[in-house]
Amino acid sequence: MDYSIRRERLSPEEYVAFLKRTDLGSQYPKERFEKRVAALVKSVPISLTARDSAGELLGVCFGITDFAYWLFITDLGVVRTHTGRGIGRALMGRALEAAGGEENIIMYTCPNENAVAFYEKLGMRSTDSLMVYNRVEWTEFTVT
């Protein structure tokens, strides 16, 4: 499978359409979904896409970073029909490079329980040292 990875900003509509084809579509709260997705795709510091030769969107990786010490992966998804082909791994590698490289950057994420094995294969490990402040109303739903 040929695909290319590039830094690219998606439109909110394209990202929502992508979410419907992945398992990422269940990680967002229902409250103000459209407005918040629009802010996400406009503002996230690292926005990478994987597309096939016809331009079909196969994968997305979003990350927040200070470009000096850390990178937090907020979104990593691959369309269901293309999982297991190395696209997610390639996106993560490119995100780490874009943030400053593995010699400088510590990478974090809060994975869905079904994705833990994937991140462990990348060499990531679980830690209990994450602190959270959350006063956000959060009604679970799945983008369909």
Image: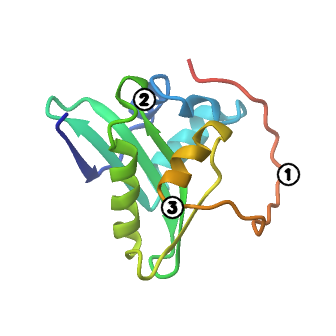
Three-letter amino acid code at the position of disc 1: Arg
Q: Disc 3 residue type?
A: Gly
Quadrant containing the N terminus in the rendered view: top left
Which quadrant would the C terminus be assigned to in this image? top right
Look at the picture and state if 8 lies above or below 77: below
Closer mark to the observer between disc 3 and disc 1: 3
For label 3, the SS is loop
Measure the C-alpha gap from mark 3 to mark 1: 32 Å
Circles 2 and 3 in contact, beta carbons < 8 Å: no
Which of disc 3 and disc 2 is earlier in sequence?
2
Q: Which residue is mark 2?
A: 18
114 to the left or right of 85? right
Q: Secondary structure at mark 1?
A: loop
Q: Residue at x 75, y 29 (%)?
A: 140
Q: Return the x and y of residue 117 as percentages of the image width and height.
A: 57, 45
Number of numbered discs: 3
Q: Amino acid at mark 2?
A: Phe
